[in-house]
Structure formats: structure tokens, C-alpha cells
Amino acid sequence: MFTSGGTEGNNWGLKGVVEAKKNVGNHVIVSAIEHPSVLQTAKYLENQGIRVSYVKPDATGQIRVEEIERLLCSNTVLVSVMFVNNETGVINPVEEIGELCQENNVTFHCDGVQAFGKINFSLQQLPVDIMTLSAHKIHGPKGVGAVYIKSGTPMQPFIHGGHQEANLRAGTENVTGIVGFETVTKLIREKIKTNSRVKKLQAYFEKSLVEIYPQAKVVGENAPRSPFISQIAFPGIDHQSLLMKLDLAGVAVSVGSACSSGSVKPSHVLRAMGLSEKVINSSIRCSFSYSTTADEIDFALEQFKKILA
């Protein structure tokens, strides 16, 4: 089903299932490191009388299956855990989580925005009931996304008023955006075969930063990670000041997630990981893409070196 993007998809994934299964139970499990579009929706559901349990990650930033199993109960209707964290790049064990949900007849929603087109997986083979996707994260147009809904998954419409999208999402479709989404999806099938090149650039970038600033810490380095995101802490350096100086030097980074880079609030992801304030307040998020070049990496490293000195 096509949507306006990841935020709408995540809202729909949670609200649609809870509404469809309101006679089954009123308990939802959500990871504490989700995108705000999931966490704020969970808060909304709490205000509607739904009991929500929040799963914290381990020290590496990964959600553990055992923690979800511990929170499951007879009236749990939904589990929501993202595939790839948008701040740390840590990959969660969604296959194991999905299998646990299947065994307990619980619907599994997965925010796949940072995974789609970037890491290899087969949606048909994953035990996922609902997955949220977004076009602009793979260089497609903004304002369009999709929600995969496995056949038989209980789901209520999120937007009412018409018969579009198999009666599940009313309103005129963004046809030009959808065509753009389709086009970039076809192109990304070839690009994903080259993500090992991006992984090498990421490894070189991180290794070089540690050489420049030996106290630097790569967040989540001991967990499986996407090659497209590096969250790096520079203890002793204020991240807001570093961000502004890098921006003036022509290097675009962010504090927290890319879509909340203007925020001065401490990262809820890093806080949930139990990291120290020294690490949280000195961390920045660096992103890579298929079009990132070695020359761009070297340019960025040179600016880091000047500024950190």
C-alpha cells in the first residue's frame, strides 16, 4: 500500500493493528530506540488506554529477542522493532523476533526504512507482518512511501473517505511519486550489490577518525551494522559546536537522526543504550550513500582533523 512516507506508514502500522485487534488484547511492545513516528504513536496509544512496554537495547544498541519474550503476555497484540536503527546503524535480529511473534500469534511491525535498498534481505522470506518503507531514503522522491502488509494481517484503515489502495488508504494517490519510487527501486537492485564498497569507505572513515582523535568511540561497533550510518562520539567535544563548524567547512553531519538534526535534545537512542552523558553529548551521526566517493571521505577527514585540533 502506498503512503506519504515512513511517518505515515509507522503511524498506520501501529494504530491499524491495535484497532483491528481491540477485542483480542490491549498490550503493545515497542523498542525504546524507534523513530519518533513510532514512539510518539505509542504514546498516543497509551493515552487511548493501550498498555505499552518499551524494550531497551543492550550495550551494543541491539534489541534482544529474550527481552521481548520476557514482556510477552496473553493480551499482547503487536510488537514493533525497527530493522536498522536510524542513528547508530545497528541491525536488529528481525528474523528471530518475527519467529517469536509467529509462535505467539502476535502481529510484528517492522520499520524497514533504513534497511530497504541498503542491506540484503528478502521480504517474502522474513517473518514480518507489516513493514514500512520510504522512497527518499534510497534517493527517490520525497512524499511517497509504502507499507507492506502480509496477506491475512488484521489491519484497519488509517485514512478514511474512499476506496483507494484496496479500501485501506483513502485519498488520491501520489502517482508521480509512486512512479519515481518504482524507478529508483529498480535502480537500487543493482546498487545494493555494491554495498561492500560503502562498507569499506565506512571502515576507513571510522579508523581514520580514531587515529585523528584517539578518544573517539564508534557507537554500536560490536553489533552488526549498516554500512550507511556511523554514530561517533568525541568525548571532550561539544557535538553542537562540532556540527556547526563542520557545516561551515562544507561537511554535512547531524546530531541524532537525520530528520531531527536541528534538535538540541539528547539522543533517546544513546540514552536507552545506557551511554554516559559525556558520550551522548559528543556524538554525531555521519551518513554514507552509494554515490559517496573516497575523495569526499578524505575531504571530510581533513576538516575533522582541523576542527578537532
Image: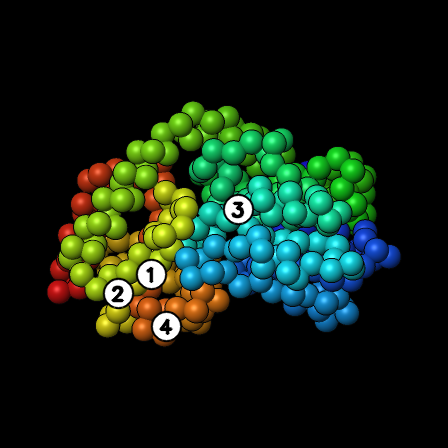
- Measure the alpha-carbon separation of dots 1 and 2: 8 Å
Q: Which residue type does callout 1 highlight? A: Ile
Spot the residue most to the right. 23
Mark nearer the N terminus (1 vs 2): 2
Disc nearest the viewer among 4 and 1: 4
> Is label 1 in a helix, a strand or a loop?
strand
> Which label number is shown at residue 29?
none
Q: Quadrant of the N terminus?
A: top right
Mark 3: secondary structure: loop
Dot 4 corresponds to which residue? Answer: 276
Q: Secondary structure at mark 4?
A: loop
Instruction: Report the mark closest to the observer, 3 or 2.
Output: 3
Q: Which residue is mark 1?
A: 284
Give the residue pinned by disc 3. 93
Q: Are marks 3 and 4 in contact (CB under 8 Å)?
A: no
Q: Residue at x 74, y 60 (%)?
A: 73
The mark that comes first in sequence, 2 or 4, is 2
Earlier along the polypeptide chain: callout 3 or callout 4?
3
Q: Is residue 57 visible?
A: yes
The residue lying at 26 percent from left, 69 percent from top is: 235
The picture places residue 144, in percent across and down from the top left corner, at: 58, 42
| In-front residue for pair 208/138 | 208
Label 1: few (<14), some or many (≥20) within 10 Å?
A: many
Find residue 234 and name its label. Answer: 2
